[in-house]
Image (tube, rainbow, N blue to C red):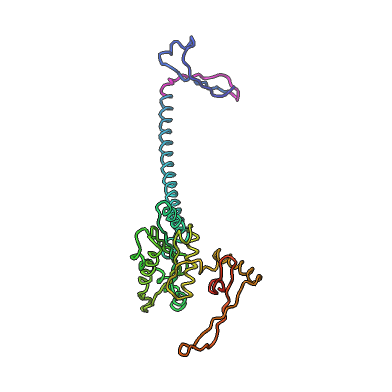
Amino acid sequence: DGEVASEVSSLTKAENVAERRDGQLLEVYVPMRSRGHVVGAFEMYTPYQPVLAAIRHDVAKLGIALSLGLLLLWATLFNLVATASRRLRRQSEENRHLALHDSLTGLPNRTLFLDRAEQAILSAKRQPADVGVLILDIDRFKEINDTLGHGAGDFLLLQVEPRIRPVLREGDTIARFGADEFAVLLPQLDTTDTATDVARRLRRALDQPILIEDLPVAVEATFGIAVAPEHGDSAELLVRRADVALHVAKAAKSGFEVYSPKIDAHSKPRLSLLGELRRGIAEGELVLHYQPQLDAATCELQRVEALVRWAHPTRGLLPPAEFLP
């Protein structure tokens, strides 16, 4: 057909008897042309083993080159993947830290504090003990912030943890909830009195002036205290009730207050009492009493004080302090 053809011959044909000593041969047929027409073929025989050896040598070199290339590619990709993995792992750890810690002080935030408080409450149920939650607020922080600037306010916030940490135990937690509000978790307490004692010592620790821009600034804090299981059996409830006690303490300027249902305007007993009071007014259960006021020297009647008492159908005669607020 006019094309060069070749094949490997094992010399099994009768005419190849003389060449069998050479082993396998590569037979090549080259067409011979004259005036564009094939007029014959040139037949050439060459030993196949050198050709095969050359091919194997070239294939081996190519295999080594490809292997080295693949090894280099793998090493490069492995390094890239390992670097990216480390970066992602580090970023994940940073994101987790930021999700659970305050960005300014590095202290645990509300989420981490609630988790630790919940764990402390569960532990206290297995080994009976009290768990205290203290919410503290820096007095006049807004005034300091507005007068000296946010930088001074941030500096003040950074001094809270170093000052109160020496007062606490190793297992106690300090957290920042935001602005100038901090929280302290006291697991494994003996009594509520222990929590109030800690609050007193924390107030003394914060009482020393802080030097801000060469200006000694007096720092005081107000505390609200709630203790499990007396004031609640969940972390959220303890924090909420410690916050109620904090607001009462700030209003009374008492330094600290322990939660009590009497001071909680949103407690279930007060809400229940409010509903009963509306019914009691409609039913005419309020009774007017007069309390005489005498002159201590002459014992003469000077005036009378009018007091409204509530003749509760099940609780008896209630004094004004129990229902008027």
- Specify the farthest residue to the top: 14
Q: Is residue 58 above or below residue 146?
A: above
Highlighted magenta segment, given as a residue range: 34-51
Residue 281 percent location from the top left of the image: 64, 72
Closer-to-camera residue (270/12): 270
The secondary structure making up most of the magenta span is strand
Q: Is residue 218 left or right of residue 285?
A: left
Closer-to-camera residue (17/39): 17
Residue 121 percent location from the top left of the image: 44, 55
Residue 299 percent location from the top left of the image: 48, 88
Residue 106 percent location from the top left of the image: 41, 62
- Specify the farthest residue to the left: 166
Tell me which corner region of the image, top left, top right, bottom left or bottom right, holds residue 154. Answer: bottom left
- Specify the farthest residue to the front: 299
Tell me which corner region of the image, top left, top right, bottom left or bottom right, holds residue 222. Answer: bottom left
For the N terminus, the quadrant is: top right
Residue at 53 percent of width and 22 percent of height: 5
Q: Is residue 17 above or below residue 7?
A: above
Q: Is residue 48 magenta?
A: yes
- Specify the farthest residue to the right: 282
- Total numbered labels placed on residues in the image: 0
Residue at 63 percent of width and 69 percent of height: 280
For the C terminus, the quadrant is: bottom right
